[in-house]
Amino acid sequence: MNNLLNYILENQASIWTYSAEHLQLVGLSILIAIAIGLPLGIYLTTNEKLAETVLQVANVIMTIPSIALFGIMIPILSIVNQGIGFVPAVIALILYSQLPIIRNTYVAINNVDPNIRDAAIGLGMSTMQRLLRVEIPNALPIIMAGVRQAVVMNIGIGAIAAFIGAGGLGVLINQGISRSNTTMVLAGAIAISILAIVTDGLLGLLQKRMTPKGFQQ
């Protein structure tokens, strides 16, 4: 334990740098994943056949081992000189994020109380007004649960990105393994765990703040 604490204190500058890289990697991938997955999940509630296909594809992507998916990116993106580093890592994390975001959005919107939806229709709301003022606020806790799941998952999987030169806290684990240095591996693993816990807590607070008081339980 003393060795671990001493290592963290002596290398705190580099740990902060790797943490910032890790947050940048995960943050950008999640923002793009939300921009794709949220509208797609909403649209799928209007097309059941397509929903089944899309969710199956997202399921299949989730079954690909993370190290394999990162490896698959290398030859594909080498065509545009982006085979290793930040870009393939971001794309892999976007793909992994799709299932929880799309599925939770689709399920949450589909499970909005029909009586509430009918009441909104009765008040003369347009489809967009109904979506923004009634359906999304009602579905927000489940949608956010999917986003939080994707974020925590990507923080963990992001450690693999170090193996393709994308940086982040996985560098500590990667170097620790290659040097048989358990202290480095533990420092990287603990930092990733703390990052996941803190980020999930902050997203929980954001979820509470975004949910209108009338929809809070």
Image (tube, rainbow, N blue to C red):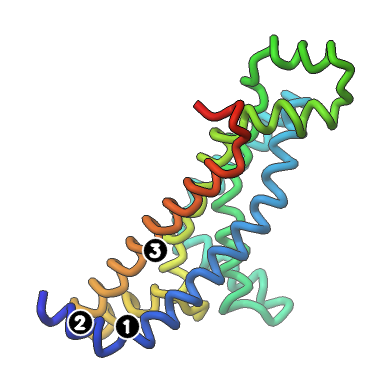
Q: Quadrant of residue 45?
A: top right
Closer to the camera in the image, 71 or 96: 96
Q: Amino acid under label 3? A: Leu
Expressed as whole percent of the image width and height from the top left, the position of residue 46 reads 78, 25
Category of crowding for the residue at label 1, using alpha-carbon neighbours closer than 10 angstroms: few (below 14), some (14–19), many (at least 20): some
Q: Quadrant of residue 125?
A: top right
Say whether residue 100 is visible.
no
Residue that numbered label 1 is attached to: 175
Residue that numbered label 3 is attached to: 195
Image position of 16 with respect to 62: above or below: below
Q: For the residues carrying marks 2 and 3, which lies nearer the camera in this image?
A: 3
Closer to the camera in the image, 215 or 111: 215
The mark that comes first in sequence, 2 or 3, is 2
Closer to the camera in the image, 179 or 198: 198
CA–CA distance in space, label 1 to label 3: 20 Å
Expressed as whole percent of the image width and height from the top left, the position of residue 21 reads 50, 76
Say whether residue 113 is visible.
yes
Which element is circle 2 on? loop
Category of crowding for the residue at label 3, using alpha-carbon neighbours closer than 10 angstroms: few (below 14), some (14–19), many (at least 20): some
Image position of 167 with respect to 151: above or below: below
Expressed as whole percent of the image width and height from the top left, the position of residue 85 reads 56, 79
Q: Amino acid under label 1? A: Gln
Residue visible at 32% across and 75% down in the picture: 173
The numbered disc on residue 181 is 2
